[in-house]
Amino acid sequence: MARSHIPAVFLLTALNLAVCWRLFQVEYMDEFGSIEGSFIAIARYVSRHWGDFSWFPLWHCGMPFQDTYVPVLHMMVAIAASLGKISAARAYHGVTGVTYALGPATVYWMAVRMGAHRGAAFLSALFYSLFSPSALLMPDVAQDLGGFWSARRLQVLTVYGEGPHITAMTILPVAILALENALARRTGRALAPAALAIALVLLTNVPGTGALGLAVFCWISVQPAGRRAAAWVVAASAAVFAYGLACYGVPPSALATIGANMGSMHPDYAGSLKYESLLLLLALAAVAAGGHLLARTRLPLWLRFAILYFGLITAVVLAADFRKLELVPQPLRMQLEMEMGACLLLGGAAWAIYGRIPRWIRPVVWAACLAPIAVQFSNYRTEAQIDTQPVDLASRSEYSTAQWLDANLHGQRVYAAGSFSFWLNAFSETPQMMGCCLQGQSLPVLDWVHYLVNHMTDPKDTEATKAWLQALGVDALVVSGPSSTDKYQDILQPSRFEGLYPVLHREHGDTIYAVPRGRPSLAHVVRTEDLVPRRPGGRMDYSEVVKFAQALGDSSRPFASFEWLRGDTARIRTNARPGDLVSVQVAWFRGWKAWVRERQVPVSADGLGLIAIQPECEGDCEILLHFAGRPDGPFAAVVSVASFALMVALFCRSAIIMNRMQ
């Protein structure tokens, strides 16, 4: 970046740092409806288990770490927490505060690289720093903000906890400017940064990746006719290269899991996928046609890109807002990218007007603009102060419940809903039956049990929760009452569990019930006929679940102890008979392996999706259970290592050539 741009980048970053400065001072904010608790939980776990987090035992009865969430932001937070010797919560706010502050600077940098005058680029980034066009375009947003002059991007970060999305948006302009640089230079050295930027977005946030894909399409569409084919080649090459870099963090198996969960997570999108995909294709065709027409005008590249990007994202967002038409998954989350396009256009328009003003009046115009800028800065600072208020943790149900469970259940699995599920693992390592981030869930039965516990209030259904929770290894049920500080209070008619489950603890209007299982272990000796059978589509009968739960609690069976030795390795000890199986209430994935006296024994899944081991031993039996990673793990690792080696080679080769030329 040329030295002439440094003052603008510095000023924009300083302005945004001044807006969000309180983020660097607060550990926990009084925003417990936010999902950031789950992101803090991932970083907290990683920072405490360096080198030992391939298996994540805290959510969904256990899951591969790659299925929790795309990892870049959480790894950055964990590194900051470990190096700074601070809590994951404080590190999370520090890292996301930095990525928030850098967002307008990257918009400025992208606009300049695409040919914008420094003044137009600066005004665009200034609008992006201190104005939220979505409040003008979407009445719901204005109502949520409390007016037209508040900070939507800041609210999404602080109130809703969308740190990964904000971070991906900061990287998105870097990816576009890197692609433009690669198209101009046509060298491997120029292609590598574009691939790296795309990979970082992919590894940071899925909606951000979708928004980047639309941005890249718009960037290609606005290229002059003579460069458009080359732009396709550059973008495709960078995308393939990028996935190679990101492959280990998002292996094919993780992509398959996300795809399989699309229907349950986005029913409006998946329910009419063919129809909405056709509409999206028509929208992209309109963008391509618009880009072809714009390329014939004298408008600069960056302005043509801003017109197309704003138009496309606005169509995606407003169609979902007004007509509930989802052209892409979770389109309303792209309102922030819509703001990026709008601010580019506003900056361009303001600069065009400024250019028509006589020179002798321009200082007066700048002076007149200082007052509204100062007012908006004050508005944003005030909102930041309101949205980042520190919380008295002792007054929160989520915190007191997490502390009690940590002190009294010692790592036994619990069922928690609402804001409890978001925040439980930000304060403890108590495993949950559910947890966060449904895109990584691999046990379909969990959705059913979640619905049964939360919403089905018939006494027979409430009675049925017992067998399901027992079958899934749950030892406690957390239920919020009317006076709870639980933000969502998802469980309907919470009093219906009284008398069905023994009460363990009451506090802050919340009740923790014990789920009687007879033997609080995750391993149990069973017979083949006790297991829930596997059927196509995961179908099962309730009577089979009851039979399985009864077998797990049968005191006449040999006891099986279960102990985690590492995050991915457990030891089971029991006294087995010929034909006995060991059922382990941990989610089965390809990659689980078991040994008895250094002899590998079969491991498979039962009808619930839990682990079933055939120990093939008699008498005292010690089983070592280890998660070796999914089968595509080695392939993904090789692809990522090779891609990084190629990137380094491209840089080094170019550096050697430059040195020889000198």
Image: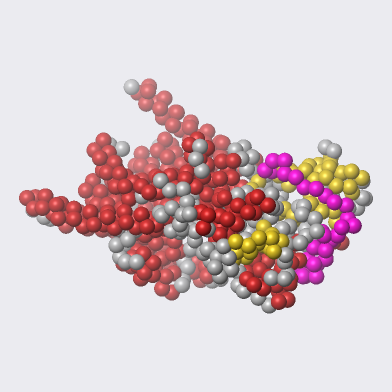
Image quarter in which the C terminus is found = top left
Residue at 80 percent of width and 58 percent of height: 518
Task: Tally the marks.
Answer: 0
Report x, y in % for residue 526.
Answer: 85, 56
Residue at 71 percent of width and 49 percent of height: 590
Q: Is residue 426 above or below residue 661?
A: below
Q: Which contiguous range is marked in magenta? A: 540-568
Report x, y in % for residue 248.
Answer: 58, 43
Residue placed most toward the observer, 28 or 435: 28
Q: Seen in the image, is 92 located left or right of residue 262? A: left
Q: Is residue 545 above or below residue 380?
A: below
Q: Seen in the image, is 442 located left or right of residue 137? A: right
Hey, which quadrant is residue 457 in on the image?
bottom right
Residue placed most toward the observer, 592 or 214: 592
Residue 439 in sight from this viewpoint: no
635 in the magenta segment: no
Report x, y in % for residue 503.
Answer: 69, 64
Hey, which quadrant is residue 29 in on the image?
bottom left
Q: Seen in the image, is 311 located left or right of residue 504? A: left
560 in the magenta segment: yes
Q: Is residue 645 above or below residue 184?
A: above
Residue placed most toward the observer, 289 or 525: 525
Residue at 43 percent of width and 44 percent of height: 94
Residue 622 in sight from this viewpoint: yes
Report x, y in % for residue 108.
Answer: 30, 47
Image quarter in which the N terminus is found = top left
